[in-house]
Structure formats: structure tokens, C-alpha cells
């Protein structure tokens, strides 16, 4: 399979130029001017390749190479192009532009696929604007319904309905959901966002499971007061209680018996936020994830028990609101087999994805797997995120071969 690596590298550079920050940082928030311009540019590439392009009501973009039996469920590939503030140019984009180049490579090879092959560019994989990740793929698989239009708002208090209408995407969100027979299989190419492939000198990773988080917004209420006047033995400091809870989350993850269990406190808001005032209220946002649902549940139960102990010891009140609790996914055997076959004779690593991807939700409606390529230092979501042209070309070549196998 011949991959036009120079063209693909140039296209990745061009896509990175659609950004609200100066290079090398990339910022491309969903439905921003830079995002809409990037979408238009990508659609032009797809039309140039002879693909049939359509968009749904939330902006998920489908570019289809029609097969000899177009009524059969298609083979899907793709990823996302939205980028968190000050990130890099390879996260998601390798799977979108790489998916397009895989189709072009198959076209150049003279293949006439039986099943149609489709590149899917998902809307808002990143949670930056609306506070929830994988918005487009959640709607595609029925994880969210039309209530999402009013449920999700950005920092300017605009609803999803308002923002997508301004961006030119109208229609009912109910129509976004795909039928179960839409895809026969789905495969996503992605940078690893971790150090394992580079560390072990292995060019490819075949993903057999994808971890999923349980996220919660936790409020700790204590008693405020003057930092000098309230004596230490009588304090009910909400921040110190939150610190203890954060350490309990770390302990629950570390003691689960598996390296696949991770726990994070990524947000901490302190009230009133004055240097000479004892914090009376703290809100933290937690992320506990695993590839095993039962093991994640045990960690969450351990965290709950710890919070009850903290309440008693420190005289505070702790309440929790679940933001989302998604189930992990076991990847489709048939897609894994196609990827393994396509990798030969190159070595590959069987691995799990600890990061969140749209494939997690596509697995609800079709057999799904992922293909990882190395990224330098395992770095992602930073301007110095990097995957070499050679690594990308290898991944796209294997993706193309897997699509060929699945489409036949």
C-alpha cells in the first residue's frame, strides 16, 4: 500500500493552521470560526477524492467511498479535529486525515471494495466547550438524546441548540442516532498518547479494550472564618477536607490491584478564595477510570467510605453529583483480527487505551477497535506533541490494509 506521506504531512500542517493560538500550539474549539473553517477545508479534500459528503444535525461529518454493494453496512474509520486550548496537531487529526489518505491509497491500488468505506469526523470529542467529551459519538450511539440541546451550555451560557444553529447545523438531535446496521465495523487510528510503544521500540499497538471514566462533582462544605482568629482545634476547613479526599482517591486507585485503575482530581474551586479566610466551601471534579467496570466500582465504593470518615473527623458535609459514568469497552474480535493481520510482518503490541476516544461509543453500535502509533515521549495535549511522518505513514498503511480486509 503506497502512502503519500509528504502530502499527508502537509495536510496535517495545514489543518494545524486553523487555530486560535500561534504555532506550535493548536486551539480549535468546536463550532469556533477556526473549527468551521477547518471543517470546510476537510470537506473539500473529501470531495476532491471523489467521496460523498454529508453532515448531521450536530456536525458529525461523513465522507463515503461507495462500494460495489452500497446497501451493505459500511466500514467506518475516523476521529476528531477539535483541539483543547494550547494543544498539539496530531491528537485526533491523524485518524481523520489518515483515514482519508487510507482511502486514497486504496483507490490508487485499484481496489473496488464490496462494502462502502467511510471517514467519519466526530463533533466535539474534547469536552472543552460543553463540559462533556465525545458529544458527537454519544449522540450517534444513542447515549444522549434531544435533551442535550438544552442540557449542555458553554461558558457564555449558550445552549448546544443555540451554538450549533449559529454554526449552521440544524435539525433534530433525534435524527443523529445511527441505526445498529449502519456500520459493519469501525476502526480508529490514533497516536498512543502514552510512552509504551516508543519505549519498547514497537511501531504499532492494537487496542483490545478502552477504559471509561466515572466523573463526579463533589462539594465539601465546612465553616469559614478569619485565618488568624479561629484556633486550629476548632476549625472545619473545607479545603483540608478536600485535600484528604483527593489523597483517598489516589489511594483507592493505587490499591485496586491493577495499573489500569486511575484516579484524578482535575478541578478544585475554593470559596471565598481569600488568603486570610478559612475556606468554607470547596468543589472538586474527579475522574476515576478503568477498563474493568467492577474494579472501578470497587474503587468508587472505597472513595465513598473514605468521604464518610472525613465528614466525621473534620466536621464537614460532603455531597457528590455524578457527571457521567460510562462503561468501558471490549473491542470487537473481528476488527482486532483484521488489524493484526494487516500489521504483518511488522511487530505490534496488544494493549488497552486508558484515554477516552469516540471509539468507546462507536463500540455500542458496531464491532470496533483502535490502532495506535507511537508519539514522542508519550506527550499529548501539549504543543510539543509529535508523531513522525514515518510512524504516521506506517499506521495509515496498516489502517488501509485493515479497511481492505473488512470491506471485502
Image (cartoon, helix red, strand yellow):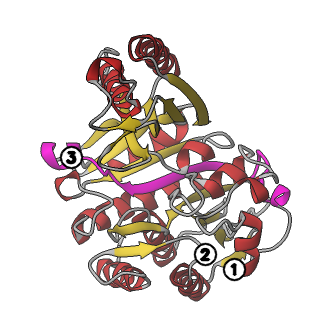
Residue 202: percent from left, percent from top: 19, 47
Q: Is tag 3's residue or tag 2's residue first in the polypeptide sequence? A: 2
The stretch in magenta equals: 173-200
Measure the C-alpha gap from mark 3 to mark 2.
32 Å
Taking the image as shown, residue 245 lies to the left or right of residue 304, namely: left
| Residue 159 lies in the magenta stretch | no
**Total marks drawn?**
3
Q: Is tag 3's residue or tag 1's residue first in the polypeptide sequence? A: 1
Q: Which mark is residue 195?
A: 3
| Residue 188 lies in the magenta stretch | yes
**Above or below: residue 8 compared with residue 155:** below
**Above or below: residue 118 compared with residue 338:** below
Dot 1 falls on a residue whose secondary structure is loop
Q: Quadrant of the C terminus?
A: bottom right
Q: Is tag 1's residue or tag 2's residue first in the polypeptide sequence? A: 2
Q: Which mark is residue 31?
A: 2
Pointer 3 with pointer 1, Cβ within 8 A: no
Dot 3 falls on a residue whose secondary structure is loop
Residue 65: percent from left, percent from top: 63, 72
Labels 3, 2: front one? 2
Q: Quadrant of residue 37?
A: bottom right
Label 2 neighbour load within 10 Å: few <14, some 14-19, many 20+: many
Q: Which mark is residue 129?
A: none
Q: Which residue is mark 1?
A: 167
Label 3 neighbour load within 10 Å: few <14, some 14-19, many 20+: some
Amino acid at each position: 500500500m503506497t502512502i503519500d506521506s509528504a502530502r499527508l504531512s502537509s495536510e496535517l500542517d495545514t489543518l494545524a493552521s486553523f487555530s486560535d493560538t500561534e504555532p506550535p500550539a493548536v486551539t480549535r474549539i468546536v463550532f469556533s470560526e477556526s473549527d468551521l473553517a477547518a471543517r470546510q477545508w476537510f470537506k473539500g479534500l473529501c470531495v476532491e477524492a471523489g467521496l460523498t459528503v454529508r453532515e448531521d444535525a450536530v456536525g458529525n461529518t461523513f465522507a463515503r467511498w461507495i462500494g460495489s454493494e452500497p446497501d451493505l453496512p459500511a466500514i467506518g474509520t475516523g476521529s476528531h479535529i477539535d483541539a483543547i486550548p494550547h494543544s498539539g496537531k496530531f491528537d485526533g487529526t491523524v485518524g481523520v486525515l489518515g483515514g482519508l489518505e487510507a482511502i486514497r491509497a486504496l483507490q490508487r491500488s485499484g481496489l473496488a471494495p464490496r462494502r462502502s468505506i467511510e471517514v467519519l469526523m466526530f463533533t466535539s470529542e474534547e469536552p472543552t466547550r460543553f463540559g462533556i467529551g465525545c458529544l458527537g459519538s454519544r449522540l450517534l450511539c444513542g447515549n444522549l438524546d434531544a435533551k442535550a440541546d438544552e442540557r449542555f451550555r458553554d461558558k457564555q451560557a449558550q445552549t448546544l441548540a443555540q451554538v450549533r444553529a449559529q454554526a449552521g447545523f440544524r435539525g433534530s438531535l433525534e435524527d443523529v442516532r445511527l441505526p445498529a446496521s449502519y456500520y459493519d465495523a469501525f476502526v480508529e487510528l490514533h497516536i498512543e498518547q502514552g510512552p509504551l510503544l516508543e519505549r519498547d521500540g514497537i511501531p504499532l499497538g492494537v487496542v483490545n479494550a478502552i477504559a471509561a471514566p466515572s466523573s463526579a462533582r463533589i462539594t465539601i462544605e465546612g465553616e469559614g472564618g478569619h485565618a488568624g482568629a479561629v484556633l486550629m482545634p476548632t476549625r472545619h476547613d473545607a479545603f483540608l477536607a478536600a485535600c484528604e479526599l483527593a489523597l483517598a482517591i489516589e489511594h483507592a486507585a493505587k490499591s485496586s490491584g491493577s495499573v489500569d485503575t486511575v484516579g484524578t482530581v482535575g478541578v478544585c474551586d475554593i470559596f471565598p478564595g481569600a488568603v486570610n479566610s478559612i475556606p468554607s466551601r470547596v468543589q472538586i471534579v474527579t475522574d476515576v477510570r478503568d477498563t474493568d467496570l467492577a474494579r472501578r466500582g470497587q474503587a468508587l465504593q472505597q472513595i465513598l467510605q473514605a468521604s464518610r470518615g472525613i465528614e466525621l473527623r473534620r466536621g464537614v458535609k460532603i455531597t457528590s453529583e455524578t457527571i457521567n459514568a460510562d462503561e468501558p469497552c471490549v473491542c470487537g474480535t473481528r476488527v482486532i483480527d483484521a488489524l493484526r493481520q494487516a500489521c504483518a510482518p511488522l511487530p505490534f503490541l496488544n494493549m488497552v487505551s486508558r484515554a477516552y476516544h469516540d471509539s468507546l461509543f462507536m463500540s455500542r453500535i458496531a464491532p470496533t477497535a483502535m490502532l495506535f502509533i507511537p508519539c514522542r515521549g508519550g506527550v499529548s495535549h501539549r504543543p510539543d506533541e509529535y508523531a513522525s511522518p514515518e510512524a504516521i505513514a506506517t499506521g495509515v498503511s496498516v489502517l488501509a490494509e485493515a479497511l481492505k480486509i473488512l470491506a471485502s
